[in-house]
Amino acid sequence: MEKRQRSYEYFRLSSARKLMAPFHDRLPVEVDRWEPALAPMIRGMRYSADGGGANLYEVSAELRTAADLFASALSEGTPVPKNMPTADPVERTPHVLREIAAHVEEWNSLPRGEAAMTTRELALRFPRLIPKLSIYFGQDGSAISDEMSGSTIEEGIAMWIDQIHPRCPWELPGTAAECYEALALFQNEDALDRFFAQEHGGGSGAVDFEELLPLLAQSCIDHMKAHHPPVWEKR
């Protein structure tokens, strides 16, 4: 029960932690420091909400919850929430979190300039693809391991799909979509390599990303056609 409670306490702030990631351990107290730093992440989370991620009102609610937890911990002398940045002095943390929560909640209606995109913001678009390119095709990836030496890139993709099956309807369509989004967004091999390999530890095996991503997407589509016809309950 204690372990379950710890998990609950941690994951109920997951979106707030994601937003706060640019600050690592130290939370700026000045608005003119935290506002521009958070602008790309807020924009990225707003984009993700259209695909089913937490909306900005939910993120704001988590920030307010975090502020309440900090305030309670500070008044009672108990540990503050883990993996959340704190202000200096730490007593300012609840106030700053509530300021940020209000800003996030009002973000859609605020006048704003176009902040430059960041790698953290862009990573929000690829929750499936980034881990796969690292685990399967990055350094020591299972699709390019010694056991797979001599295998083609198609065989590496097939190995991954075999491991996913039969959960494919909840994994492959989204992966295919992220492949095409990456191609539309990054547009050339240099940009793809910089983002997926240099910044996020992914790889493309023995081929370029420009070759791997269309192949990965098409393999997902072909497998779905062969094994998972579109079936759902009629209204």
Image (spheres, helix red, strand yellow):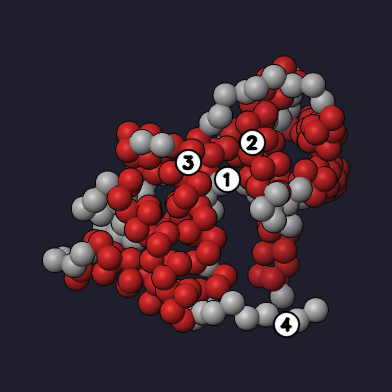
Q: CA distance from mark 3 to mark 4?
A: 33 Å
Mark 2 and 1 residues: CB-CB less than 8 Å, in contact? yes
Relative to 221, 28 lies left or right: right
Category of crowding for the residue at label 3, using alpha-carbon neighbours closer than 10 angstroms: few (below 14), some (14–19), many (at least 20): few
Earlier-in-chain disc, 1 versus 3: 1
Earlier-in-chain disc, 4 versus 2: 2
Q: CA distance from mark 1 to mark 3?
A: 16 Å
One can see residue 123 in this view: yes
Q: CA distance from mark 2 to mark 1?
A: 9 Å
Category of crowding for the residue at label 2, using alpha-carbon neighbours closer than 10 angstroms: few (below 14), some (14–19), many (at least 20): many
Earlier-in-chain disc, 4 versus 1: 1
| Residue found at x 72% / y 82% | 233
Figure quadrant of the C terminus: bottom right
Amino acid carrying label 3: it is Ala
Of residue 20 and residue 75, the one placed in the foreground of this image is: 20
Amino acid carrying label 4: it is Glu
Q: Which mark is residue 233?
A: 4
Nearer to us of marks 2 and 3 is 3
Q: Position of residue 97 (x, y in %)?
A: 78, 35
The residue that label 1 is drawn on is 124
Q: Position of residue 87 (x, y in %)?
A: 71, 30
The residue that label 3 is drawn on is 184
Of residue 8 and residue 78, the one placed in the foreground of this image is: 8
